[in-house]
Image (cartoon, rainbow, N blue to C red):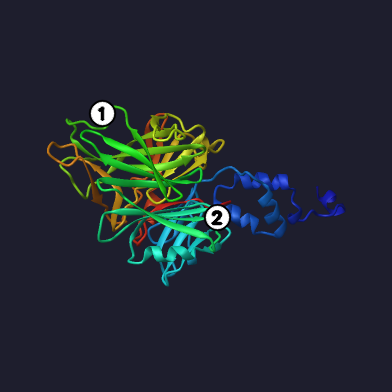
Amino acid sequence: MAASSSSSPRCPWPDLQPELLGVVLSRLPSHADRVRLAAVCRPWRSNARLLRPLPPLLPWLALCDGTFLSLPDGAIHRLPAADDGVSVRASTGSRLFLVHGDGRCSLMSPSPSATTPVPEAASWFQGKPVVRKVVASDHLIAALVESKNSETAKVIISTRGQPWDTTRCSTMEWAEPEGGLVSDIAIFKGKIYALLTTKMKRYRQHELRILDDGHEQTIHGTLPGQEAWYDPNSTEFHLQRNYLVVSGDRLLMVEQRISEPWPRDWGALKLTRHFKVLEATDLSSSGCAHWTEVDTLMGRALFVSQGCSESLPASAGGQSSGTGVEEDCIYFLNEKKGSSQPGLAFLNLKPGRPFVSKINGGNCENAFQDSGVYNMRDRTVMPLLSETLVASTAGEGPWSPTWLFPEP
């Protein structure tokens, strides 16, 4: 080999064949490693852009103090533009929606770092409302906000004719109806969907409101029969969260069941016991859609949080390696923070008590102790983070933990 190398010209690293570069990229376990590889030289950066699609990676965790934790390596990242004088930080999936200290609004892509201004959104946050969620696409951006002086929420929607054309846009507002709770919003096939939950006598009704071109359309969908989790003889309180998640060509509603012992102990750790996934079917039939329970995610996994919920295709070998996205699994966050959590529903099983009401959250300490991975096949829950990582992410801050999906 020594004789061969001395008589033959050396092949420089920038000339590494794209096929070999693709093998290396596909085996890197984190977004940060993929970015570092592409930053080595211009040929590698150009070839890395052509090597698509790459196996999906686990997302980042946006932490309370404004930093970001990448999985599974546990590296901490700080994006200066994401916490320097920022009053609102919301994940829209692959980008961050930011409200800066001077009132400017922008969308920032973590990799590569690029910021796009959103001028018309600056007026949305006068009075500093509680921002529960922001969703965005090339033509739409919508914010679910709640006034600090009222529990009534509203959805603010901006529509553009061309992708991020700030010269032609229209804005509308949709107020949460009395007696209903907007649990979540999502963009599905170019339209804004709002999940509205209303209390009935012995069950909850979930409606989809389509907010399109300033016109509201209601799609009713009642869970069949008695609410499955209602048991008057139970000795536990149940907290429930509802999420809207776009998974491929399906719109899913995810119900998370969190239990705590009775008598109530506000300091006790609340544990997630179960998830239920339902698909909104027959959406094309005006007012005739149904919720259909599903037992498979069809080769995908779900990542749910109040601030951002997404679906990713499962990684080949992800379950065996423990570093990829596992099929038919739901990744969830505890999401404790110092302010109220409006999207959290409280299910009281004791006679003579309200059936559903809103509650307040705790602080950010040990925010990830009840964050985990729920396997829909065997209905087991595994911890999301190791004890070491839980301890390292327990810092205090103004933000709610959520998911961020940097583009590779």
Relative placement, left or right, of 313 versus 289 is right
Amino acid at circle 2: Gly
Q: Secondary structure at mark 1?
A: loop
Question: Position of 56 compared to 371: left or right?
Answer: right
Neighbourhood count class around disc 1 (C-alpha, 10 Å): few under 14, some 14–19, many 20 upward: few
Q: Which mark is residue 202?
A: none
Q: Which residue is mark 2?
A: 161
Dot 1 or dot 2: first in sequence order is 2
Give the farthest residue toward the right. Answer: 7
Can you give x and y, in whole percent of width and height, for residue 349 in the image? Answer: 18, 36
Q: Which residue is painted at 45% across and 68% down in the image?
A: 104
Q: Residue furthest front?
A: 215
Q: How many marks?
A: 2
Picture coordinates of residue 324, whole percent (x, y): 52, 41
Seen from this angle, which residue lies furthest bottom?
102
Badge 1 amino acid? Gln
**Residue at (55%, 58%) from the top-left corner?**
164
In this view, the residue farthest toward the left is: 352
Of 363 and 102, the residue lying toward us: 102
Residue at image mark 1: 226
Q: Residues within 10 Å of mark 2 (few under 14, many from 20)?
A: some
Task: Judge from the rendering whether residue 238 lies leftward or rightward of residue 293; answer left or right.
Answer: left
Measure how far apart labels 1 and 2 are at the Cα level: 45 Å
Task: Please name whichever residue, 89 or 212, is drawn nearer the observer in this view of the structure.
Answer: 212
